């Protein structure tokens, strides 16, 4: 990280900042970062997807716990083996309390009164085991900023609620610094990078204790670095993508990016860059093996149920949770139907997933105004304009051959398929002909990769470059006007 900021400083001193870079930095710092801080400060704890268990993982990283662990006692909800991390239970109570579902404050207590109560929650006598079968499996790297923020707050005498706010602010700071570095270092795709960082869903995650905001910022930085030439940018970009794949193994196919960017596809480039691709993939593969060995337990606790139509065994069998081994049998027995499941899920839930990709706030309970979704759709299209306006061999020296673009598209499709299949194996009842648990936010880290996909389009090159910035900036300003009102209406009345 220090090397990146030294490179940014040298770049700023050696040449005047291009107007596009200055515009992107100005919009990000003035209109995106304040929204992230507002979310971190004003949104009640626990009202971001998975935040209570994410808080427990942050606390475990602060305590030096590299990976979660299984325990011999049974999970009371599922009746199966349990897994989790070690954390102070006061943090978990404070995180859940913000949702309005924790005693002793009544469920219908006003947000102001509840906040007063949550702020007074005390620390438990010491760390204990906290069941968190999902977040226990995550690598610690993306939790470091939140852990540092929580640690600083605790050193200052903070109670659990304030410690969670400290974790959120740690993530907000890391997100801001990574975003600034990406916008400074990108040789192309800067508008698409800005749009990715400014999505309402990105902002919502970045201002929480959830690791996903940091993961998105690291993915953006990795892509920005791979648009540059030179060994320093290349290896830093590989390190960023390796961190993304480590935290989220379904993104492992993005290991193809170092092989083709920035110089394009050639036999010599493949030979020189193969170690970079390996470096991206290996940490995630090794971590996945560690998770299977030490952490993985059946998810989706539920009442006993009969398997669905894809189950090749006896349909009178009973299951009480998801079962990856049983699901795999169904996938192998019905390979064609299984391969089409992600397509069916995407088609059937497209509008829901699209809205979640742009932003559905709270715990996926607060939709944005319809006009804002329309604006973001136009902003995403407009962000592709500067990419299409470049020739196939651009001023940045990047060769964009059709086969290169096809490889990137294939890697993105493989990542999407892995996301769907992972959720089918771990979060869907056995044998069902649907996929449960898919959320639009899972696909945001792949958005900046589109930088390497867009072909040159002659008509786009005829328009002034500033034209493409009008709709995205207007959309960001509209988001800036909408989110604070939503937060105040939903949480501060």
Image (tube, rainbow, N blue to C red):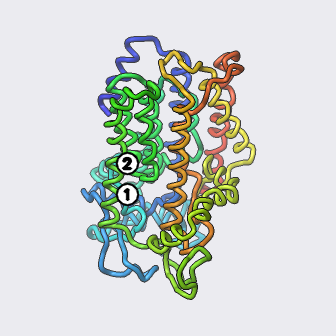
Q: Looking at this rendering, what residue extends furthest in the top direction?
A: 15
Q: Quadrant of the N terminus?
A: top left
Screen quadrant of the C terminus: bottom right
Q: Residues within 10 Å of mark 2 (few under 14, many from 20)?
A: many
Residue at image coords 47%, 37%: 220
**In the image as oriented, which residue stretches furthest toward the bottom?**
316
The foreground one among 88 and 216 is 216
| Residue 66 in the figure: left or right of residue 226 | left
Q: Select label 2 or label 1 by which is in front.
A: 1
- Above or below, 88 against 185 in this view is below
> Is residue 302 in view?
yes
Tell me the element at label 2.
helix
Residue at x-position 34% and y-position 38%:
239
- In the rendered view, tell whether residue 422 sits above or below residue 407: below
**Image disc number at residue 142:** 2
Q: Position of residue 122 (x, y in %)?
A: 35, 66
Residue at the (59%, 44%) spot, across then down: 200
Q: Are marks 2 and 1 in contact (CB under 8 Å)?
A: yes
Q: In terms of depth relative to the viewer, which is nearer, 89 or 41?
A: 89
């Amino acid at each position: 990280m220090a090397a990146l900021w030294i490179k940014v400083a040298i770049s700023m001193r050696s040449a005047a900042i291009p107007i596009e870079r200055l515009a992107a930095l100005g919009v990000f710092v003035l209109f995106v970062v304040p929204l992230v801080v507002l979310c971190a400060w004003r949104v009640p704890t626990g009202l971001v997807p998975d935040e209570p268990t994410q808080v427990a993982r942050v606390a475990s990283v602060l305590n030096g716990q590299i990976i979660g662990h299984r325990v011999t006692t049974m999970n009371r909800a599922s009746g199966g083996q349990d897994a989790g991390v070690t954390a102070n239970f006061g943090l978990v109570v404070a995180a859940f309390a913000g949702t309005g579902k924790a005693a002793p404050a009544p469920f219908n207590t006003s947000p102001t009164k509840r906040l007063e109560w949550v702020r007074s929650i005390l620390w438990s006598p010491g760390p204990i085991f906290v069941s968190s079968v999902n977040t226990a499996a995550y690598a610690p790297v993306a939790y470091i900023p939140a852990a540092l923020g929580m640690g600083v707050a605790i050193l200052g005498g903070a109670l659990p609620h304030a410690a969670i706010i400290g974790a959120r602010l740690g993530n907000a700071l890391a997100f801001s610094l990574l975003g600034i570095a990406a916008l400074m270092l990108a040789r192309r795709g800067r508008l698409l990078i800005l749009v990715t960082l400014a999505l309402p869903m990105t902002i919502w995650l970045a201002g929480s204790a959830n690791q996903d905001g940091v993961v998105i910022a690291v993915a953006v930085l990795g892509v920005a670095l791979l648009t540059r030439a030179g060994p320093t940018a290349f290896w830093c970009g590989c390190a960023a993508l390796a961190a993304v794949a480590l935290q989220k193994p379904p993104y492992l196919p993005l290991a193809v990016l170092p092989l083709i960017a920035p110089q394009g596809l050639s036999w010599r480039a493949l030979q020189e860059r193969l170690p970079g691709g390996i470096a991206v993939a290996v940490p995630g593969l090794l971590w996945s093996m560690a998770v299977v060995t030490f952490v993985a337990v059946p998810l989706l606790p539920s009442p006993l149920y009969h398997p669905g139509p894809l189950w090749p065994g006896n349909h009178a069998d009973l299951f009480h949770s998801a079962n990856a081994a049983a699901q795999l049998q169904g996938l192998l027995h019905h390979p064609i139907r299984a391969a089409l499941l992600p397509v069916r899920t995407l088609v059937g839930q497209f509008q829901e997933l699209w809205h979640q990709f742009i932003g559905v706030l709270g715990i996926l309970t607060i939709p944005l105004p319809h006009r804002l979704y329309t604006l973001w759709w136009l902003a995403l299209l407009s962000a592709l304009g500067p990419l299409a306006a470049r020739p196939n061999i651009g001023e940045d020296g990047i060769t964009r051959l059709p086969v290169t673009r096809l490889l990137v598209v294939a890697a993105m499709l493989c990542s999407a398929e892995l996301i769907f299949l992972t959720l089918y194996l771990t979060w869907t009842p056995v044998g069902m002909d649907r996929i449960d648990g898919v959320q639009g936010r899972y696909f945001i880290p792949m958005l900046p990769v589109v930088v390497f996909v867009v072909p040159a389009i002659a008509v786009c090159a005829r328009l002034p470059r500033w034209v493409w910035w009008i709709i995205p900036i207007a959309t960001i300003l509209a988001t800036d006007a909408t989110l604070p009102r939503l937060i105040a209406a939903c949480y501060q009345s």
